[in-house]
Amino acid sequence: MTTAADPKPYTIDDHPKARRSIETTRSWAALISCGLVAFLSIQAGSTTFDGIVRGLIAGCLMFILAWGVSVMVWREIVRAEIVQAREMVRERRAAARQAILDAQAAAAEQRQQDA
């Protein structure tokens, strides 16, 4: 359960490139495997109908397999991007804190010189 203070968990669907990449990967994998299995089955002596059925079955299985692999890969990519973004935010906060401390020290030094 997320509250107002908790940010919404980041998902692969939220990533601008992940969804498109997953859809493209699984479509091409299914298409290539369907055509390849159908072609090889027909070349091996199966009837055209049997070759096409085998190709369709292989295409469906490859569609699911490619989807699963793509999701696993993109999950790791998204995690790495989140870690990188968090590190960048930490570095920017540290630089901003240091700039504030430097400005405060300079102002204090200026006050001492003016007094």
Image (cartoon, rainbow, N blue to C red):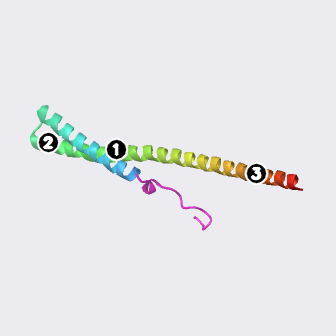
Q: In the image, what residue type sits under mark 2? A: Asp
Say what secondary structure mark 3 lies in.
helix
Residue receiving disc 3: 101
N-terminal of the two: label 2 or label 1? 2
Q: Residue beneath label 1, please? A: 66
For label 1, the crowd category at 10 Å Cα-Cα, with few meaning under 14, some 14 to 19 and many 20 or more, is many
What's the distance in space between the residues labelled 2 and 1, CA to CA? 24 Å
For label 1, the SS is: helix
Which sits earlier in the primary sequence, circle 1 or circle 3? 1
Most foreground residue, 1 or 97: 97
**Residue 91 lies in the magenta-colored region:** no
Tell me the amino acid under the disc marked 3.
Leu
Q: Position of residue 111 (x, y in %)?
A: 85, 55
Q: Residue at x 49, y 48 (%)?
A: 78
Circles 3 and 2 in contact, beta carbons < 8 Å: no
Mark 2 — residue? 50
**Which circle's residue, 3 or 2, is located before the other in the chain?**
2
Q: Tell me the chief SS of the magenta region.
A: loop
Describe the element under mark 2 as helix, strand or loop: helix
Q: How far apart are marks 1 and 3 (CA)?
A: 52 Å
Whole-percent x, y for residue 38 in the image? 17, 39
Which of label 1 and label 3 is nearer to you? 3
> Is the residue marked by circle 2 packed among few (<14), some (14-19), or many (20+) residues within 10 Å?
some
* Pair 3/2: label in front: 3
Q: Are marks 2 and 1 in contact (CB under 8 Å)?
A: no
- Give the answer, above or below, for where 113 lies relative to 40: below
- What kind of residue is marked 1? Ala
The reply, left or right, for residue 67 in relation to residue 81 is: left
